[in-house]
Image (cartoon, grey):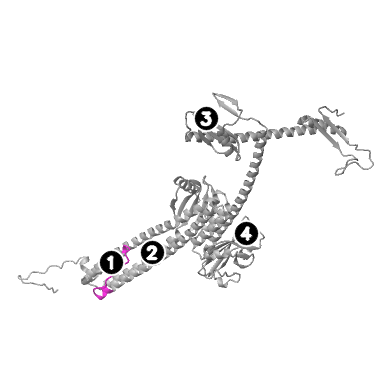
Amino acid sequence: MESKIAMTSSSEPVAGPEPKVKGLQKLKMTVVGPLTIGLVLILVFGLMLIVNIRTGEAGLQRALQASSQPLVSTAARLLFNPLYTLDIGTLDDMLDRFLGPHVVYVGVRDLNGHVVAEAGERWTADEQTSMALAAQALAQGDIVRYEVDDYLILTSPIAVGSEQIGTVEFAFATASMRATLGTTQRTLSIAILIALVGTILIIAVIAQIVTQPLGELAVVAQEIGRGNLDTPVRIRGTAEMATLALALRQMRDQLRGIYAGLEQQVAERTRDLARRTAQLEATAEIGRAASSILDIDELIRRVVELIRAQFDLYYVGLFLVDDAGEWAVLQAGTGEAGRRMLDRGHRIRIGTGMVGWSVAHGQPRVALTAEEDAVRLATPELPDTRSEAALPLRSRGRVLGALTVQHTEPGAFDESVMTVLQIMADQVAVALDNARLYTESQRLLTAERHTYGEISRQAWQEMLRTYREWGYRYAQHQVSPTAGEWPPDMVQAIRTGQVVHGEDGRRGVLSIPVQVRGQAVGVLSFRKEDERWTEQEINLVRAFATRLEAALESARLYHEAQRRAAQDRLIGEVTARIRETLNMDVVLRTAIREMGEALGIPRVEVRMATSTIRPGGKGAAQGDAGPTENRASQENQDVDPD
């Protein structure tokens, strides 16, 4: 066997084993650098994604809260009148109109928490939660907010001033908005992932010379992650760094575009909600005017001006059907054009034109392009009209007239605008009908009061004529009848109907007329020694006089009722006596005796027309010897009825 032994000289050391290379030392800088930077970028972009997600969630909550609370507040004001009158049909219609892409449920509850009307699908089967939210809203007097699962619940009290009559509950579905936000965030994540992968591939070929520019880009990425999408991205360094900078810039631009699109969507929805809120506020304003103004002319003028101002319209006019039911007559119009048409008595025959068609059919009619509508009648005072709508004024099953609204832009009246306008037209119609009924009731009430006042005055005059002296005096704790001439201050008070306050020697004199239904029927005179009457004492005495007037009128009415009852009883007794026999001669004798005794009249006489005297005749018939009337009389003596 052959073996080889390596020998070295003593002057040369033997080489030891090579040291082991650790794992990190095996990596090259071109690998370590990109890996390190890649890890840093992953961390940065991850933080940026988390910040974007949280920012998106917070923005979604703020946008939803800002858009939902005005809607709930306005709805609470609009629902007051229908809930107060328990108009379930109007409540159902209004609740159905509130439903939308994000409003999935609207419910109205009374003060006891019971559901009065609701629309949409219930957000929970737990009735206690809704009742607790309603109770909390009534207790706080403000909107209560509650979030559960994919719903935002807002409960508001329905009140005017301090008067609360119920609550309204809105359920907003946040799932769709969260889905939109999730889609945006996923897109953003993909974009970030693509940019991250591209960045890592790019920096894989760089060396230490690009470390500083890479740090700058990392700072830029952090700023972008914080939401500062206006951060400039400088292109510097090698071609790879320039590529990385361009990728970062593209990512920033993509994020800016994504955010701009999201902001545009939010802005559009916010504008739509703001427009709806403005329309609902206009409806509420019309409702307030309709409920507070009872004068028909003032109400009509106020309504047309409010609608024109709230909807920024070119012209608004209101027509009412005439008594004959043939013409719709203009009652109010906005602007100079409206004044000119009113001056010339503008009217439209029912069945012609948009207004006449709307009145005849009881339905709204819209001309999105005014020139193309075959029914529309052009008005020379309104040359700039490009779109027009006519809405019927319906109340209690009748069409009272129509409302015409005109705009200078074509297609101005979409379905949502027409819905709100029709609600306002119905409110105006009901208000006009109520104002008409109020005016008629006031006229009848005034006539009734006038008639009753005249009857009362005549009754008092008749009663006062039956007394020569009628009055009482209280002095020294004694009440005694009055007599003699009236003092001058009392005469002045009853003649003028005014309070007489002056001095009579050393006595303070105060005379107050006692008036019933505007007629002075007496005078209260007060005197006190060596003192003047204070304002408080005068007001107290006036209050006493007012109570006395009411008491006197009540006593007169009671006396009149008693007198009529006595008369009716007396007539009944006399009639019963007369009907006790069927003999005509006995009937006549009994009648005059009973009437004479009942009335206290010394002489009563009754005669029957015989052949000598005929009703409407001039005397006895020719050839007769003389009158032969049957006669029965009583002269202070009893007549035997037998």
* Residue 400 against residue 593 in the figure, above or below: below
Q: Classify mark 3: helix, strand or loop.
A: strand
Q: Is residue 47 left or right of residue 110?
A: left
Q: Position of residue 190 (x, y in %)?
A: 37, 67
Q: Earlier in the sequence, mark 3 or mark 4?
A: 4
Dots 1, 2 in contact, CB < 8 A: no
Image quadrant where one finds the C terminus = top right
Determine crowd level at label 2: few under 14, some 14-19, many 20+ residues with C-alpha closer than 10 A.
Answer: some
Q: CA distance from mark 2 to mark 3?
A: 93 Å
Q: Nearer the viewer, mark 3 or mark 1?
A: 3
Q: Earlier in the sequence, mark 2 or mark 4?
A: 2
Q: CA distance from mark 3 to mark 1?
A: 99 Å
Q: CA distance from mark 3 to mark 4?
A: 65 Å
Q: Classify mark 2: helix, strand or loop.
A: helix
100 part of magenta stretch: no
- Identify residue for label 4: 399
Which of the 4 image quadrants contains residue 119? bottom right
Q: Classify mark 1: helix, strand or loop.
A: helix
Q: Which mark is residue 220?
A: 1
Q: CA distance from mark 1 to mark 2?
A: 20 Å
- Identify residue for label 2: 185
Q: Classify mark 4: helix, strand or loop.
A: strand
Which residue is more in the foreground, 308 or 258? 308
Amino acid type shown at disc 3: Arg
Dots 3, 1 in contact, CB < 8 A: no
Q: What stretch of residues is rendered in magenta?
A: 225-242
Amino acid type shown at disc 1: Val
Residue 150 is at least partly visible in this image: no
Query: Which residue appears at 24% of the width and 67% of the height?
Result: 215
- Identify residue for label 3: 527
Q: Is residue 210 left or right of residue 434?
A: left
